[in-house]
Image (tube, rainbow, N blue to C red):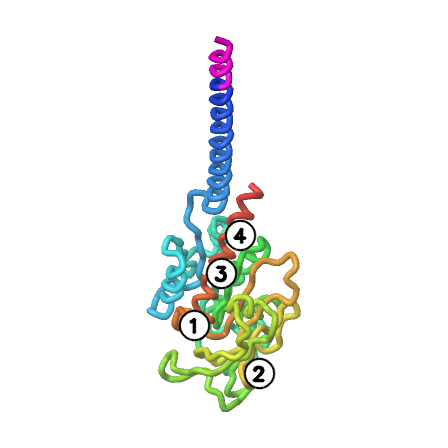
Amino acid sequence: MQNLDNMIIKSIQNRKRKAINLFLALSIIFLFAECTNTTESKITDGKNLRIAISKTSGSPSYEQYSHWLLMVDSTIEIIDMYHKNLDSIQEILKNVDGILLSGGEDVNPELYFAGERAQYCEKTDPRRDTLEYLMMDYAFGNKMPVLGICRGQQIINVFLGGDLITDIPTFNPSPISHRCQRADTCRHPIKITTNNLLNQIINSDTHNLTVNSSHHQAVGIIATTIQPLAISPEGIIESIGWLDTNNRSFLLGVQFHPEHLDFQHPLSGNIAKRFIKETKRFRLNTNSKN
């Protein structure tokens, strides 16, 4: 009888141990799932990423900026800022995760104190200059990711205190053609300076790559807070980023058009992916403060 009692006691004890172990295992799984779900909710907050583009409509070239980003994440909400009321820009940007300054018309030379060079400009758009200044003022003030393409790179430099080569053929003539009659047919090599953001983005030691080119203006005197990340063979600045990245958000300017390059080109898809990654990081950081 005593042996039977001992067997019953041991059986009960074994069941208790198994029940406790099962409870602990389920608790760990539950807590892990809760932790994972919380992190995901912080990243997405139940909303799609929202990216404001200064102009992304009116022609196939403008529309390509949106198509290019959507190749990375088809759920992104693109906001075309060009036709928005200028008084509402700040309110719109409060619900945005990154801004892209697209290509387009010449920057007004009055903005870099060179009004006498207006004769060398082509079409300008003062309203767009104002729009992009408002966008940059908000983005830099709130450490929001900023990507500038072609004109976008140029106006970043002007906003931060630099100036522009108002017309490359006049003020910086060279055998390299930076703009051709047929769009996106001009190509030339660029050299990426070592150990900078652009190197990190392409994840390669390749410093010489060929890019497309369609511009007659370019960064001239560079603003003191930024640095060249890439240059063309005759010294035209092809990419810019912060000189000191400490306590600064993502900033990249490129003079070429990654949205028109093959997405597999090292300076196309990689740039789009990194920009989207930075907008997600911004969303996460913003939600963690709220």
Whole-angstrom CA distance, mark 4 to mark 2, is: 34 Å
Residue sitting at 53 percent across and 89 percent down?
Answer: 173
- Which amino acid type is marked by label 2? Gly
Which residue is identified by label 2? 235
Q: For mark 1, give the secondary structure.
A: loop
Q: For mark 3, give the secondary structure.
A: helix
| Magenta residues, start to end | 1-10
- When asked about the image quadrant of residue 46, the answer is top left
Q: How crowded is mark 1: few (under 14 residues within 10 Å), some or many (20 or more)?
A: some
Decide which of tag 4 and tag 2 comes sooner along the chain.
Answer: 2
Whole-angstrom CA distance, mark 3 to mark 4, is: 11 Å
Q: Indicate which label's residue lies in the foreground, 4 or 1.
A: 1
Q: For mark 4, give the secondary structure.
A: helix
| Quarter of the picture holding the C terminus | top right
Q: How crowded is mark 2: few (under 14 residues within 10 Å), some or many (20 or more)?
A: few
- When asked about the image quadrant of residue 66, the answer is bottom left
Q: Position of residue 270 (x, y in %)?
A: 46, 66
